[in-house]
Amino acid sequence: MNNSARVWFTDRDLGKQFPRILAEAGLQVERHGDLFEPTGSDEQWLEHCGTNGRVAITHNSRIRYVPNELAAVKRFKVPLVVVVGQASNAELARNFVNTVRRVEAMLDVNPPPVILKVYRPTPSELAQAPQAAGRVEVWYPKA
């Protein structure tokens, strides 16, 4: 699937700035806040993503350890991307945009259900190239 065909769904924990930066970079984005109540369950948006072919993005690295949420990822065959790191949503979004080709490549060879982790580049990598891409790893299923 090419970049223009994917729709990225951003979880509420990423706020408004993260999806705006992705959209400004030319990615198709759906925001949690545009479709769901803030108090809605994670299972609701995970079902939406799996059923509608969305790639879910969250900053919630605990999702793999919450049995009902992991079960929803599996049941609805969700491609889920977890952005990792203590950084502002804007910084996480800029890293995601810089890394999206690597994310796409991993999604192309790892059919859902899958959970990918996206890490920010190291400070030395950023010093050499401010637009450096981060690292992408398959977090679920474990090989």
Image: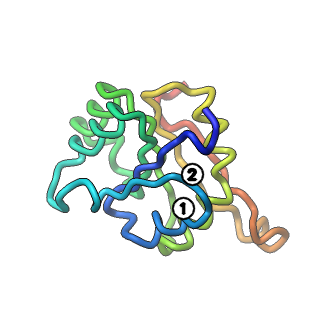
Task: Give the percent coordinates (x, y) of residue 34.
Answer: 28, 60
Residue where numbered disc 2 is placed: 118
**Residue 128 located left or right of residue 67:** right
Figure label count: 2
- Residue at 76% x, 71% y: name it: 130
Query: What quarter of the picture does the C terminus occupy?
Result: top right
Task: Give the percent coordinates (x, y) of residue 23.
Answer: 53, 62
Q: Are dots 1 and 2 in contact, CB under 8 Å? A: no
Residue where numbered disc 1 is placed: 22
Examine the rendered structure and indicate whether residue 41 appears above or below residue 143: below
| Category of crowding for the residue at label 1, using alpha-carbon neighbours closer than 10 angstroms: few (below 14), some (14–19), many (at least 20) | many
Q: In front: 124, or 130?
A: 130
- Residue at 41% x, 50% y: name it: 9
State the SS at label 2: strand
Q: CA distance from mark 1 to mark 2?
A: 15 Å
State the SS at label 1: helix
Quadrant for residue 133, please give it.
Answer: bottom right
The amino acid type of the residue labelled 2 equals Val
| Category of crowding for the residue at label 2, using alpha-carbon neighbours closer than 10 angstroms: few (below 14), some (14–19), many (at least 20) | many
Query: What quarter of the picture does the N terminus occupy?
Result: top right
Task: Give the percent coordinates (x, y) of residue 42.
Answer: 24, 47
**Residue 61 located left or right of residue 101:** left
The amino acid type of the residue labelled 1 equals Leu
Q: How is the image coloured?
A: rainbow
**Residue 67 located left or right of residue 22:** left
- Residue at 35% x, 39% y: name it: 49
Q: In front: 106, or 122?
A: 106
Task: Give the percent coordinates (x, y) of residue 18.
Answer: 47, 67
Which badge, 1 or 2, is on the more N-terminal residue?
1
Quadrant for residue 120, please give it.
Answer: bottom right
Residue 87's tag is: none
Examine the rendered structure and indicate whether residue 86 appears above or below residue 118: below
